[in-house]
Amino acid sequence: MGLARTYAIGLVGLDGHLIEVEAHIAPGLPGFTLIGLPDTVLYEARDRVRAAVINSGLKWPDRRMTVSLSPASLHKRGSSFDLALACAVLGAGGAVPKSALADLVLIGELGLDGRVRSVPGVLPAVLAAVRAGMKRVVVPAPNRAEAELVPDASVADVRSLPELVARLSGEPFGDDEIPDLEPAADEPVSAGPVLSHSSSALEYPPDLADVCGQADARKALEVSAAGGHHLFLQGPPGAGKTMLAERLPGILPALELEAALEVTSIHSVAGLLPPDRPLLTRPPFANPHHTASVVAIVGGGSSLLRPGAVSLAHHGVLFLDEAPEFRAGVLDSLRQPMESGEVVIARAQAVARFPARFQLVMAANPCPCGQGDSAELLCVCPSVVRRRYLARLSGPLLDRIDLRISVDRPSRGELLAIGSGEPSASVADRVLRARERAAQRLIGTPWRINAQLPGRELRGRFAPKPGALAAVDAAMSRGELSARGLARVLRVAWTLADLSGVDRPGSEQVGVAFSLRAGRFAGVAA
Amino acid sequence: MAVKDTVGRWGEDVAARHLVAAGLVILDRNWRCSAGEIDIIARDGRTLVFCEVKTRRGAGYGTPFEAVTVAKARRQRRLAAEWLEIAGMSVPDVRFDVVGVLCPRRGGPRVEHRRGVI
C-alpha cells in the first residue's frame, strides 16, 4: 500500500492555486475520506471517481483511503479535481507509476463510465500551473485548444481514464479503443450554458451599413470607439439606439494577445467560451437585461464566485439598454469598477478579483412614453414624471459619461435614401489609426487610450493648443462646466484630434467635444 | 434456515479454522445479547480479539469488507463493551478484526484476515 501525490489547480475567481492531492492507502476496512475543505461538488467526486475507476476496468483499492487536498485552508470547489483524485488513488494503489505523476497537473471531470469531461476555467488554470512552475498539464480533449493558448505549457489531452492510465504507464493505447467512450453527439462540449449574445454577436457582427442616417450618433460612436469613452444614447423608441450600440464592438480594434487571454480567461471561468473558438480576439459585448441583479452585473455568488456582466465586458462593451429601468443600486454599483477597472468580490470563504475595464454604453428613452421632445411627436407624460425618469440615472454615474447623444428617428429622406451608410470596416480603420496615434503619443506612460488620461496631465503635458479653451469659455463662466467636466471634454478633444490627424486639439476639437458631452437634454449639468 | 444463513454459518466455521491455524484461541462464538451478535471472540497472545466474519459468494455486491459499514463497526464496539462487562475480565489490549470469506462457485474458499481495522 502506499502514498501517491498528484497536482491540480483550484480557481478562486481568475486566480489559480496549485493544489497538491495526496492519497494514502492504509490497511483497514474499505473507506474513502476526502479532507481539505472540499465543497459539495468536490465531495461528490468520491463517488464519481470510484465509479469511473471501476468502469474503466481498473481495480479500486479495497482499503482505507485518505485523500488530502492541500493547502488545506483554501476552499476548493468544482469538479475539475476528479482526474487528479483518480490518479492519486491509482498511484497509491500501484496501478499507475508514481514517477509518471510527479510533475503533472491534472485537470478534468470524470463521467461514471470513465470518460473525461470538459470543465470551465481551463485557460486560467493552465496559466496558474505554468506560473507555479508546472509546465506539463493534462486536460480534457475538448479543452485542448484553450490550454494550448498558454505559452510554455506542454499540453496533453485525454478522452478517458483508461487512456490516461495507459499513457502514464507507457502502454500503447490505440485510437480504436476510444469509440465506445466517444461523447454523444448532442453532448455540449462547453461546460456551461452558452449565452446567445456572446456567440452569435461574434459570429455575425452587425454592420454600421445597416444604420440609416444618424450622422451625429455615428460620429459619437466612432469617437467612443477611438478613445474608449463611455457613451449615452437618448432618443425615442425605434430611433436606432440599440442598433448603434450593438455595432460598437464591430468598430473596435481586435484584442491584443494579453487582452485576449484575459477576456478568454473570464469567459472560460464563466463557462461561456464557445467550443469552436478557444481564443476570443474580438472585444466582447455584454447586454444584461434591465431586471439584472447587482450580483449578475458585478459578479459574485454564494460559493462559486462567478464574473458578472462588467467582467464579461472586460476590454469590450457593456450595453445597458433602457438604462433608467435598471434598479438604482445596480446602476451605482458600476461606479467603482468604472474607476478602478476591476471588481473585488469578498465573500466569507474567498475574495476574488475580476478585471472589469469596460466601455459603458447606456441607452434611454427621454421619458416613459418615449416620445420625448421630438419635433413631430407629442409627449403625453406629466412634466414631473419626465423629470424623474432620467433622474434615475444618478449624477455621479452620468458625470462619468463623456459622450451624450440625442438620437432622433431617421427622417423620411434618410430612410428612403438609396444605398447604405458607411460600413463598419472603414470606420474601424479610422478608429484603429486614431488609437495607434494615441498609443504612440502615450508610449512610456501607463495609459493606452485617451479616456484614461488623468486630469493633471491634461493641464500639463497633454494640454490643448493655446487659446483652444475659448470654445468653452462661455460655458465655464456660466458655471455649466465643472473642472472634472472640462477634463472629460479635453479627453474627447484629444480623440477628435487623433481621428482627424491633428497633432494637438484646437478650439474646433474642444468645441465639438463640448457639444458631444452636453448633448441636447435638459436637466443634466455638464 | 435461509440459504444466506447457511452460507454465513459455513463462512464462520471456515474463519474459525483460519484463526485457530493462525494461532488464536477461540473463547466464544456467536455470542448474543439484545443489541446483536459477536461472531467470534478469541485471544491472540495477551490481546482479546473481537472478530466479525463476512461471507460472500462473489464480488457482485462488493467485497466482504465493504459490508462492514460505519454503523456496524460502531455496534461491534458497543457489543464488545457489553461482553467485557459481563465477562468481568480485565484485559490489557482489545482488538477488532474482520475476516472476509469469499467462496466462489468453483474452487475453494478464499479467506482474508484483517487485524485491528475497526
Image: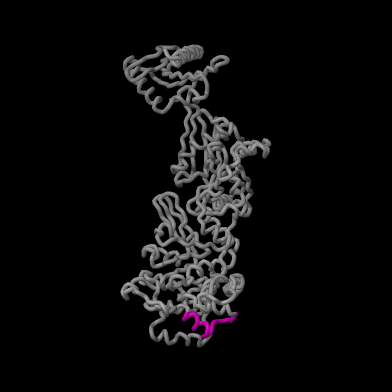
Structure colour scheme: one colour
Location of residue A278 by image quarter: bottom right
Q: Quadrant of the N terminus of chain A?
A: top right
Disc count in the image? Answer: 0
Q: Quadrant of the C terminus of chain A?
A: bottom left
Q: Residue A125: percent from the left, percent from the top?
A: 55, 50
Q: Residue at x 58, y 81 (%)?
A: A503
> What is the span of residues highlighted in magenta in the rendered image?
A501-515
Q: Residue at x 54, y 18 (%)?
A: B104
Q: Residue B79: percent from the left, percent from the top?
A: 36, 20
Q: Main secondary structure of the magenta part?
A: helix
Residue A341 shows in the view:
yes
Q: Residue A417: percent from the left, percent from the top?
A: 56, 77
* Residue nearest the viewer, comparing A228 with A524: A524
* Residue nearest the viewer, comparing A18 with B89: A18
Q: Residue A15: percent from the left, percent from the top?
A: 51, 53
Location of residue A156 by image quarter: top right
* Residue nearest the viewer, comparing A156 with A324: A324
Q: Is residue A174 left or right of residue A498?
A: right
Decide: is A394 above or below A72: below
Location of residue A375 by image quarter: bottom left
Residue A258 shows in the view:
no
Q: Is residue B107 left or right of residue B55?
A: right
Whether residue B17 appears in magenta in the rendering, the answer is no
Q: Residue at x 63, y 39 (%)?
A: A179
